[in-house]
Amino acid sequence: MVLSACAASPGDTLAPGAATVDSSTSPEDVVRTYLGALQGGDQAAAAALTTRPYSGRGAWAADPPTIEDVEVSEAITQPAAGAGGAVGESHAQEHAQAVLVPVTFELHGADTSMPDGQTAWGYLLVRDGDTEAWRIADAGSA
């Protein structure tokens, strides 16, 4: 299965280009929507789901590899607002709430920085209160 049509677990879908999220959208669904937008070639929709510093990392978004068999796991609360030790900790420290969303996928057509094959990855999402939508602030190997 390709990302845009991927079902990692029953009921788990990714929505390419559907970048409308609000404060009730779960961090896991923000990641699904982001990955769907990237695979659908909608860089503007993907960028809308990130913080300003993270959206500047557009090289991967410009020519994304194919991602299959995506599994988005439950968000894990991260230290925020002055605490250290989180993935992307400097980004987490700038916000009141931070979570890490672990993701695994099969990667095809990537460059040497991310070799093809099974990949464990994580997205750090942040917000400053329950009335704000989650935004991706950082990502890296999990």
Image: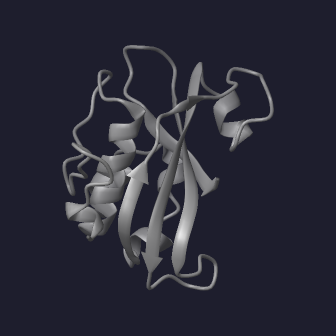
Q: Residue at x 65, y 32 (%)?
A: 92
Q: How is the image coloured?
A: one colour
The quarter of the picture where the N terminus appears is bottom left
User: What percent of the width, then of the height, locates residue 16?
Assistant: 21, 57
Give above or below for 18 relative to 42.
above
User: What percent of the width, then of the height, locates residue 136?
Assistant: 48, 43
Q: Left of 133 or right of it: where is 21?
A: left
Q: Residue at x 50, y 33 (%)?
A: 75
How many labels, in total? 0
Q: Along the line of sight, which residue is nearer the eye, 139 or 4? A: 4
Q: Left of 18 or right of it: where is 36?
A: right
Residue farthest along the front direction in this orientation:
10
User: What percent of the width, then of the height, locates residue 32?
Assistant: 33, 48
Q: Left of 99 or right of it: where is 58?
A: left
Q: Along the line of sight, which residue is nearer the eye, 30 or 3? A: 3
Residue farthest along the top direction in this orientation:
130
Q: Residue at x 26, y 34 (%)?
A: 21
Q: Residue at x 44, y 85 (%)?
A: 109
Q: Left of 128 or right of it: where is 94?
A: right
User: What percent of the width, then of the height, locates residue 30?
Assistant: 35, 40
Q: Quarter of the image holding residue 40?
A: bottom left
